[in-house]
Image (cartoon, rainbow, N blue to C red):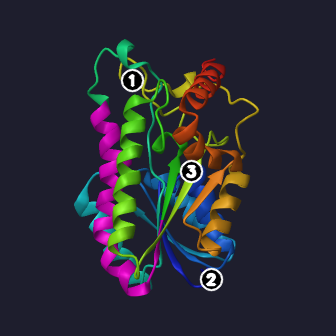
Amino acid sequence: MLLKNKVFIITGASSGIGEELSKQLSKEGAKVVCAARTEHKLKKVSEKINTSGGEAIYVQTDITNLKQCQSLIDRTIEKFGQIDGLVLNAGISMWAKFDEITDPSFFSDLMKTNYLGSVNCCFAAIPFLKKSKGKIVSCSTAQALMGFPNHSGYVASKHALHGFLETISMENKEEITILEAVLSWIRGTNLRGNSFRADGKKHKDESRKHTSQSVSLESCVKSIIDGIKKDKKTIYVPKKLSLIPFLNTFFKNFLQKKVVREINKNKS
């Protein structure tokens, strides 16, 4: 896909991957619509893009609210007249063994944001994406492909989104393309600090340090944009994650042991 003058909506654009994607897509000549719940952060991102010679607007949006997602799409069409890309980036995580959880009600929040929020965005945007033969980009994770300790509710929500988008791709093969970006731990985001603990509260300042296996925010975003340009169906960041489907099919025990080791390294 050529990015110049294309219109991209990015959810979770107020920080981390969403913020960096918004800036880098703008540098490639795309027109950017930044969406998230925190208005003052969105405003800063949008202003940075516009003062740097790009073109961006922001729309405060809670993606768990279908009406707000429809308003996001309406505002985009009103301003730019088209939608060429929808980046599903907004998400929340967890870090707790299931048998240590004292109240599983936060699983509903995980599902509403990571899965149903993306469904809401797609529902509102698909008619316009079909007109432009546009693209949906899912900022996914290895947890969408297999189980991960301490992430049961997050895994479930990402599995759901993976299956949903695979179906959307099958139903709209000639009209919409989908890129799934399977990501490892990325430095420079607040996903860990915003994750749920066993008691249902957020980790916040208790977030764990990344190991040397993590990937920088800049490298991650560069890979995603490269995948968009080349119309890839799936990218893996880092590339070694591309082994997961094969290992999960033929060497499941080996893969699970390796994942448990890596999770244990990230506990502290």
**Label annotation for residue 230:** none
Placement of the C terminus among the 4 image quadrants: top right
- Whether tag 2 and tag 1 are in contact, CB under 8 A, the answer is no
Image x and y of residue 176, in percent: 42, 76
Q: SS class of the residue under badge 2?
A: loop
User: In the rendered view, would you say 19 is above or below 106?
Assistant: below
Dot 1: within a 10 Å radius of its alpha carbon, few (fewer than 14), some, or many (20 or more) residues?
Answer: few
Instruction: Give x and y (percent) for residue 114.
Output: 38, 47
Residue that numbered label 1 is attached to: 201
Write down the residue under mark 2: 2
Mark 2 vs mark 3: in front: 3
Amino acid carrying mark 1 in the image: Lys
> Does residue 63 show up?
no
Residue 103 image-quadrant placement: top left
Per the image, the residue denoted by label 3 is 182
Q: Residue at x 43, y 50 (%)?
A: 38
Q: Check residue 119 for magenta coloring.
A: yes
- Quick check: is 203 in the magenta stretch? no
Magenta residue span = 107-136
The Cα atoms of the two marked residues, 2 and 1, are separated by: 43 Å
